[in-house]
Structure formats: structure tokens, C-alpha cells
Amino acid sequence: MKKVNWLVVLTGALIGLAALVLTAQGNPANMGFCIACFLRDIAGAVGMHSAAKVQYVRPEIIGLVLGAFVMSVATKEFRAKAGSSPATRFVLGAFVMIGALAFLGCPLRMVIRLGGGDANALVGLAGFIIGIVIGVQFLKRGFSLKRAYEVGSAEGGVLPAVVTGLLILVLAVPALFKASTEGPGSMHAPMLLALVIAAVVGALAQKARMCMVGGIRDAVLFKDFKLLYGFVAIFLVVLAGNLITGSFRFGFTLQPIAHSSHLWNLLGMVLVGWGSVLLGGCPLRQLILAGEGNGDSAVTVFGMVVGAALAHNFGLAGNPDTLNEAKELVVGGISTAGKIAVILGFAVLAFISAVNLPKEEKAAVGAKAA
Amino acid sequence: MIDARGYSCPTPVVMVQKAVKAGNPDTLEVLVDNQCSVENVTRFARSGGYQVAVAAEGRDFRLKLQK
């Protein structure tokens, strides 16, 4: 039995608890945290897409980045770095977002959905693991987006500065931003509470190196289970909370902000798992890394925001299950355009995975293909 | 000596894993530039039976792995 890293377990438990509190205080069901959904809501709030139901400046994103920033500065871990294939990361970020919105959640929300009894998240988890295993094959062959370099501190502070600016603007001139009056975007915990909770979570996640993709990746790659304990802790706390409050409901259909189109839940999360391995971390981890000075992760976050805007402007994102007027189930899912975007995502990831292998591996892959 | 500066995890650990698999060296030096990689390489090396000594070098860290 390997030593359990209690900081990771504690952080996971706290994230689970925070998710329960945020939901009880107004966030949508099974959406205490969802990095993909929240970045999508911010994209909507600043007018990058016009899906009226998903527009809100989510303070959780601001809090996570600033919490990580403060913790990294306090522990002298803040280090401004950039230059590791930023344009490629931007594109990867966009496709990770398109995959996450096909499933309707980032890996963190997948775990939270699991804890609420949403069986579609099990399908998503299967896809996520498949995606990670695919990504790991490329890591083993030497895939790398190349090294980053030390840059000026100001470059490392871009995302913390951007979210601080966003916070000031939303407090000073709220009318500047769009805010949903119905749908998920209209459901939110009080701003200050969400901001503070997320800042604490961001600080701890920085220290614990919390990452949803890292847990499964490291288990597959190195038999290192450290981060996986965090993943399990989030699940157990959310599960316990939902059982205690009576919010647990097991099943596939009509789960909150979820669809039961199995194939696309699976494939959406394959895209997220694979893309996140190539990026070196899940969407949550990208926010945290950007907070501790990583300019490449900041670019990835911007890529995710653009991916969210594209997903809603082109109707690629998943639609939840609904009941029609006759109270019959209408299974949600994604449009034909959404399916094409997910498939296109696989082609793009395969290309990026192959061209960033070391030379000798590239030759071997080329020979096999020929 | 493995220079993993500028690489973020898991790449430094993959580099060490490759070197260990290739020659199973008794000693190995790894240079990384962030605390997260120090922790991850250390954990990986210890699980492979290495003792690890970490020394700060400016803003970087030199890890000495020894069987």
C-alpha cells in the first residue's frame, strides 16, 4: 500500500464540499463546479456567443485563478513561464472545450455528476479513461509540446490580471455584461460567497497539484496514485452529501443538465481526456497553472473560451434531455454539426499528437501508415 | 544528466522513466525548474528504489538519484 497524500485527499474533500455548498446556494444541480460550463458562461456574458441561457460572469473562475495566484506567490512558487507551443495549446484548449460541451461538463463536473447518481457520467468516465490511455501512448513515445522559457513576471500575471479586471468591471458596471434570466446561467450562488469559496479551492488545488486527468494518467503511466485519491475524495464527499440531502438520483434519463446520448457522451469525453493529456492537465489544472505564472496555460484558457463561443455559435454543444408537452422523454444530445466537430477534434488531436513526437518516432509512425 | 527545465509534468518524469528503463543506472542527475516536478520525480524515483537528494540551484532544482 502506497502512502496516501493527505493534502490531496483533503483538497478533494474540500472541493466536493464546496461543490455541494455552491449548489445549495444557487448553482445548477450537479454543477457546484464546472470549469467548461463556467468559462462558457463567461464567454456568453461578454457577448462572444448569444446562447441566452448560458451567460453569467462566474466568480468561481475568478476565485480559482486568484487563489492559485496568491498561494503560489506566498509559497514562492509563482514563476512566469511561456513558450511551449502556445498556438497549439490554444487549438487544443478549444477542442477540449468542444468535447466537454458535447458531454456537458469538464472532468470535474463529470465526477460531481457521478456523485449525484448521473449514470451518463459513468459513460463519460469510460470515454475519459479511453482518451487518457490514447494520450499516454503518445507521451510514452516522447510526445512533447517542447519546453517553456522564463519570461517577465508581467507575462505570468496575465490571467490573474485579466480575471481581476473582469471582477472590477462586473462589480463596478454590471450592466456591461449579459446575464441569463432563465436556464443554467441564471442559477448561481451569491457572487461573494462563490468568489471566496473558489479562492480557497484554488489555493489548495495549487498546493495539492489537483488534476482530474493527472490522477488517471499517472496511474496508467507510472502506477502513481497520488492524484487519483483527490478524484475519489471529491466523488465520495459529493455522493455522501447528495445521499444525506436526498438529492441523489441514479439513472440515465432526465439528469440535471445532462443528456443520455451515450455514444456522444463517451466520444466527447474521449476528446477531453486525450486533449488534456496532451496539454498536461485538465481544465481546472490549466486555470491553476495560469494562476501560478504559466503563460501557456493562460493561452489554453483563452482557447477554451473561444472553443465555448464556437460551440454555441455553431450549435455544437449538447442539449439536455427534456420532456415534451405529452410528458414523453426527448433524449438530448448533440447536433450533426456537433458530431462533425467532435470527429474533427479527433483528427486534429491525432495530427498534433503525431507531429510533436520525436523524429525517430515520427518516422516509425510514418512507416506504419505507409 | 537529464535537463528537464522548462518542461512541465508529466514530461520530466517520463524522461526519467525512459532513462531508468534504458540503462537502469545506479546514479542519475535531473535538473528541473519547478516544485511540482521535484515532488513528482522524487516520488517516481523512490518507488523505483532510488534515494533522492534535492539541492536548489538559483531558481532551479538538481535532483541526485542514487540506488
Image: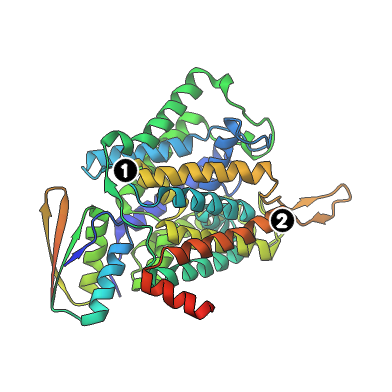
Name which of mark 2 and mark 1 comes first in the sequence. Answer: 1
A100 to the left or right of A231:
right
Residue B55 in picture, x, y percent from top left? 10, 57
Q: Which amino acid does the dot numbered 2 rest on?
A: Gly
Q: Write down the residue under mark 1.
A: A292
A288 to the left or right of B45:
right
Q: Secondary structure at mark 2?
A: loop
Label 1 resides on the chain identified as A
Residue for point 61% across, 51% down: A101
Q: Which amino acid does the dot numbered 1 rest on?
A: Glu
Q: How is the image coloured?
A: rainbow
Label 2 resides on the chain identified as A
Quadrant for the N terminus of chain B, please.
Answer: bottom left
Residue for point 48% across, 79% down: A367
Which numbered tag is attached to residue A276?
Answer: none
Residue A76 in picture, x, y percent from top left? 21, 42
Q: Write down the residue under mark 2.
A: A333
Q: Quadrant of residue A251?
A: bottom right
A243 to the left or right of A301:
right
Residue for point 57% across, 40% down: A27
- Calculate the distance from the C-alpha at mark 2 to the C-alpha at mark 1: 36 Å
Quadrant for the C terminus of chain B, please.
Answer: bottom left
Q: Is residue A190 above or below residue A72?
A: above
Residue A242 in picture, x, y percent from top left? 56, 53
